[in-house]
Image (tube, grey):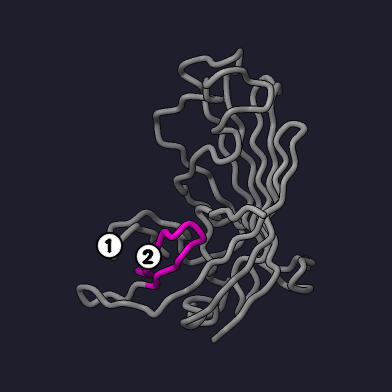
Amino acid sequence: MKLYLIFPLILLLLGCGKTSSEYFPLGENIKWEYRIQKELGNNQNEGKSIIAQLDRVKEGGVYYFPYLYANGETLYYNKNESGIKLSSSPDQNGQIFIKTPIEINSNWLRETRIELLNSRHESFAGGESFISQGEKIFLENTVTSFDETITVPAGVFSNTMRIDSSVSITVKERTRGIDAIQIEQTEWYARGVGLIKRTRRELSVPEKYNATQVTELIRFERD
């Protein structure tokens, strides 16, 4: 069984009309275990990922919350007036992961990458990668609901927050007849738990290649 890094996934959220302390931080020494199902062409595989929230650290008068991912990488999150920020080290100038205040139709940009198609497709010969994309990619994120009920292996969660995201990327160096890559993503968050489900689809334009990935919460533990 393979182990995957869920990137960039953070297990926090802010609710409409609620205080941020109800959602972030959720507490220290927490672990989340996820099932990850991936489909690329005719290939399907399943893996797991474990993410641990470590003890918070204080740098320059600011508290940061470290999250240790399955590949050994640690990412740091902190909250200021503009929202939750993400960085690879304690740094107040990280990118905004979730903008605050959170409310219906709230939207913001978040940097991403080609996660699923950025590798050799099963039909490719030789060592040519799927696509060469040098510029930064930003998802447009929108909060679309606070009342969906979602069932995952960890249980049934009601009144979840849903974030829909998308971006279309023009391919500068045309690869295998592909003009663009479309990314579509949806995340669901539950109060007091964090991320419970994520779906992501990446497809080429024209649609010659496509890949999907579904991430679902299996277990949530507090030490």
Reading the image, the residue beneath label 2 is: 76
Reading the image, the residue beneath label 1 is: 91
The residue carrying pointer 2 sits among few (fewer than 14), some (14 to 19) or many (20 or more) residues within 10 Å by Cα, namely many
Figure quadrant of residue 103 = bottom right
Please, what secondary structure does the residue beneath circle 1 have? loop
Q: Is residue 145 visible?
A: no
Q: Residue at x 53, y 71 (%)?
A: 14
* Amino acid found under the numbered disc labelled 1: Asp
Real-space Cα distance between discs 1 and 2? 8 Å
Residue 61 % position (x, y): 22, 77
Question: Sequence order check: which comes first, mark 1 or mark 2?
Answer: 2
Say left or right for 183 vs 44. Answer: left
Residue 98 % position (x, y): 48, 60
For the residues labelled 1 and 2, say whether their Cβ atoms are less than 8 Å apart.
yes
* Amino acid found under the numbered disc labelled 2: Tyr
Residue 71 % position (x, y): 48, 56
User: Above or below — where is 20 with respect to 76?
Assistant: below
Q: Residue at x 53, y 58 (%)?
A: 9
The residue carrying pointer 1 sits among few (fewer than 14), some (14 to 19) or many (20 or more) residues within 10 Å by Cα, namely some
Please, what secondary structure does the residue beneath circle 2 have? strand
Q: Main secondary structure of the magenta part?
A: strand
Q: Residue at x 44, y 45 (%)?
A: 111
Q: Which label belongs to residue 47?
A: none
